[in-house]
Image (spheres, coloured by chain):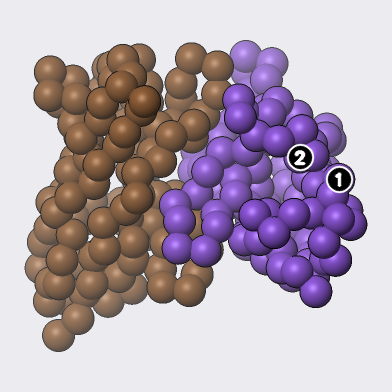
Chain colours: A purple, B brown
């Protein structure tokens, strides 16, 4: 299976400061169609997950531009340039290149 | 707007069965692979199963293989998950989500239906 490992698991951040989450895959995530289906999801408290970023760096329509994704191969990063109150929640990386689909453990972003 | 509405959850004894449904609207249902993802209380997300848009291909997590069956009815825009031989560790909130779409995956999620397996 493609194991997804996120660090850190908890990220206390001061409002207006940046946050960064790393995600490492145990194997490369390049699909036979040439795309890398590495996604980032946000789950606010009491809410279902919401797709933020797809194919490493593509922001979903309506997602603020303070969210950005980057990476290649087996190492990927989600960055929030200036954390706002509404960003509190758990962030998951997941790969949908291969079956079984796999998720990282989740990173809890909270305000200091 | 796209809506995915799960139903069918509830309390069931170990060894019992349940059938979950997910009614989709606001999208061309047959264009999307569909998935079930679950979340045990206080835990992270776990992919359960995926079915292709034409229902010809299905995939399962090892933890549910042989016990759960995913299916869909494109004429009714509905996704199903038949869960048999339920175990206590199947207790979770079960989300329906789009899997493979036109340009991206896992764009849309329902709010989930709670399955509790307990004696």
> In the displayed structure, does residue B27 sit left or right of residue B47?
left
Answer whether residue A30 is visible to the viewer in this image. no
- Marks 1 & 2, CB-CB < 8 Å contact: yes
> Which residue bears the numbered disc 1?
A81
| Side of B62 relative to A5 (left or right) | left
Residue at (31% x, 33% y) in the render: B3
Sequence-first disc among 1 and 2: 2
Outermost residue to the bottom:
B119
User: Where in the figure is residue B106, as x and y percent of width and height?
Assistant: 49, 34
Q: Position of residue B62 (x, y in %)?
A: 40, 54
Residue B110 tag number: none
Position of residue B26 in the picture relative to residue A112 (left or right): left
Image: A98 above or below B30: below
Task: Say left or right for B32 vs A5.
Answer: left
Label 1 crowd bin: few (<14), some (14–19), many (20+), radius 10 Å? some
Who's the residue at 86% across and 45% down the image?
Answer: A81
Q: Would you name the residue on which mark 2 appears?
A: A67
């Amino acid at each position: 299976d493609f194991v997804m490992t996120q660090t850190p698991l908890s990220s206390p951040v001061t409002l207006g400061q940046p946050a960064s989450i790393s995600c490492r895959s145990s194997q490369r995530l390049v699909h036979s169609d040439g795309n890398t289906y590495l996604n980032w999801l946000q789950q606010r408290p009491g809410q279902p997950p919401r797709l933020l970023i797809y194919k490493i760096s593509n922001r979903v329509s309506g997602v603020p531009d303070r969210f950005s994704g980057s990476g290649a191969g087996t190492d990927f990063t989600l960055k929030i340039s200036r954390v706002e109150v509404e960003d509190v929640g758990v962030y998951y990386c997941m790969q949908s290149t291969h079956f079984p689909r796999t998720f990282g453990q989740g990173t809890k972003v909270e305000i200091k | 707007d796209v809506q995915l509405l799960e139903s069918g959850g509830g309390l069931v004894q170990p060894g019992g069965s349940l059938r979950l449904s997910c009614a989709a609207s606001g999208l061309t249902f047959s264009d999307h692979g569909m998935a079930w993802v679950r979340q045990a209380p206080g835990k992270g997300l776990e992919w359960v199963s995926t079915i292709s848009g034409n229902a010809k291909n299905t995939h399962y997590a090892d933890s549910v293989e042989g016990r759960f069956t995913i299916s869909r009815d494109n004429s009714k825009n509905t996704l199903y998950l038949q869960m048999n031989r339920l175990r206590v560790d199947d207790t979770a909130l079960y989300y329906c989500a789009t899997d493979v779409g036109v340009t991206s995956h896992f764009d849309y999620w329902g709010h989930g239906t709670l399955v509790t397996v307990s004696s």
